[in-house]
Amino acid sequence: MTCEKCREDLSALIDRALAPEAVQKLWGHLRVCSDCSLACAEICCVEAIVHSNPAPAAPNDLWDRVRAALPALSGRERAAPDRAAILTPEEAAAYLRITVAELMESLSDIPHFHVAGQVRFRSEALEEWTKAARERAVDAPHSK
């Protein structure tokens, strides 16, 4: 075993994530290599220190403070995305306040593109498309 391979496997050894054969090879190397033995001892000391200090408990009012700091949003309302943002179908649907199913059914009308087989939307293009759709609706003659 090389020192490089040994150092790569030390964390897995500490986490008990190595197969028994790999553990035997690692211990064989640690018996003959003082540099890797020292590295192993250092990792073991750090792990012991980390596990001897319990994680601090979150304050009882933490969730209330987080909730109070968040903007009040209801239903599908969301803040407008960054104009340069690339949106997933879920984000685009939320922005347009429609369901993802409605969005996907209307792809022929809504500006979009594909990246690695995934449908994506540019927020700026959605803003322009929405504005144009509103203008068409206002300009359309009313039917009786």
Image (spheres, rainbow, N blue to C red):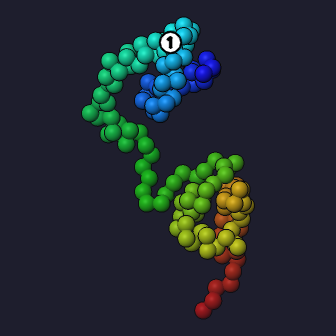
Residue placed at 48% from the left, 60% from the top?
Answer: 76
In the picture, measured across the screen, residue 63 lies left or right of residue 108, that is left
Q: Check the image and report above or below for 78 versus 110.
A: above
Image coordinates of residue 14 in percent, x first then y, are 44, 24
Q: Please identify the quadrant where the C terminus is shown.
A: bottom right
Image coordinates of residue 140 in percent, x first then y, are 69, 80
Q: Quadrant of the rendered structure where residue 61 is?
A: top left
Note whether residue 90 is visible. yes
Note whether residue 98 is visible. no
Q: Please identify the quadrant where the N terminus is shown.
A: top right
Structural crowding at the residue carrying mark 1, measured as other residues with C-alpha within 10 Å and reported as few (<14), some (14–19) or many (≥20): few
Q: Check the image and report above or below for 55 versus 102.
A: above
Residue placed at 43% from the left, 43% from the top?
Answer: 70
In the picture, measured across the screen, residue 107 lies left or right of residue 51, that is right
Residue placed at 42% from the left, 29% from the top?
Answer: 16
**Kind of residue at disc 1:** Arg
Please tell me which residue lies in front, 136 or 99: 99
How many numbered callouts?
Answer: 1
Pointer 1: what residue?
A: 31
Residue placed at 57% from the left, 63% from the top?
Answer: 93
Residue furthest out toward the bottom: 144
In the picture, measured across the screen, residue 10 lies left or right of residue 48, that is right
Q: Check the image and report above or below for 117 versus 79.
A: below
Q: Say what secondary structure mark 1 lies in.
A: helix
Residue furthest out toward the left: 60
In the picture, measured across the screen, residue 36 lies left or right of residue 47, that is right
Image coordinates of residue 9 in percent, x first then y, are 54, 25
Please tell me which residue lies in front, 42 or 128: 42
